[in-house]
Image: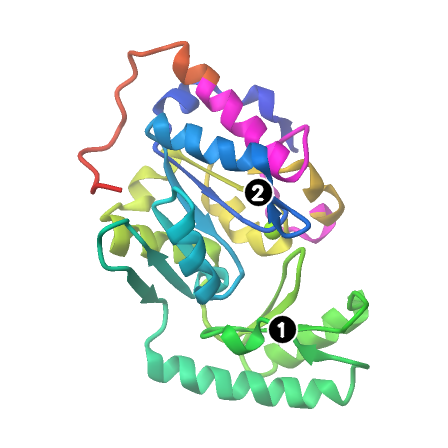
Amino acid sequence: MLRPLSTLPDDLARSLVGIAFDVDDTITRHGRLEEPACAALWRLVHAGVRLAACTGRPLVWARTAASLLPIDLAVAENGGAWVRAVPGSPRVEGFYDPEPARMAQRAVLHQVFERLRHEIADLRISDDGPERLVDLTLDAPGRTLTPAEVARIGQAIQAVGGRCLVSSVQVHITLCPADKASGLRRAAGELLGIDLDAQRSHWIFIGDSPNDAEAFAYFEHSVGVANIEPFLPQISSPPRYLTRSDRGLGFAELADQILAARSSSHTSPLPHGPLPPR
Ligand SMILES: [Mg+2]
């Protein structure tokens, strides 16, 4: 059962190492970064909290996010790729699967799409599809795909050993075994030298959609922004806590609570050793 965010333990807030967060409809509204969420990111950074964006968006999009936002890394394409962009240092990137595997997977994804486009009216590759290096995103112009159509897409991709993931924005088909949890684990290890398995009880994940389910399950302390509620029946592993506010306002609510708890105590040592510079 989802608990109010206000019941998040103060001890967790004080010993928190980092926050991993979904992007669309978690820190954005109508695709734009919300002002309170942007301010919250900076306030968390100044309080020493590590930040990892984790999105279904393409890697090229995550490169921009990693460069523009005060974050330690950005995981893209639902865990299939990741990037770290430290000012003054070369950008570092990684992929869950090696390039030959990704190329073979993408050929099959396009075959699946060609099959489906004859069955589902107006089905198309989303406008960010050509930018993608791991998965493929599908939509229909001017309308939302119906649950039956999404189920059909799921059947078609499962028939070739893949998965269908649904975000608040798009339907993804992928043959990459990564998800937001496994992608974050690999990215944190490769880019930050962090063993996330060892630290995860000192991290929080916050998101809003079915493609966040694996991260909700992996992180003991997971939070849903209030706009997650319509998706809850589709989420096998719901978050533990729920914010009162939606989208970026919900993210800011989480930051407010953590920072208030941390400012009320200056004695809790962080449970990690030295971390690489931002
Ligand atoms: Mg989202």
Location of the C terminus by quadrant is top left
At 66% across and 81% down in the image, what residue appears? Answer: 156
The residue segment tinted magenta is 232-259
Neighbourhood count class around disc 2 (C-alpha, 10 Å): few under 14, some 14–19, many 20 upward:
many
**In the picture provided, is 208 more to the left or to the right than 205?**
right
Instruction: Name the spot of residue 168 as percent of width and height, x first.
Output: 67, 55
Q: As displayed, is residue 11 above or below residue 227? A: above
Q: As displayed, is residue 10 above or below residue 77? A: above
Location of the N terminus by quadrant is top right
Amino acid type of the residue tagged 2 in the rendering = Ile
Q: Which residue is mark 1?
A: 127
Neighbourhood count class around disc 1 (C-alpha, 10 Å): few under 14, some 14–19, many 20 upward:
few
Q: Confirm whether the magenta stretch covers residue 12.
A: no
Tell me how far mark 2 sits from mark 1, CA to CA: 21 Å
Which mark is on residue 102?
none
**In the picture provided, is 209 more to the left or to the right than 187?**
right
At 79% across and 81% down in the image, what residue appears? Answer: 120
Which one is earlier in the sequence, the residue at label 2 or at label 1? 2
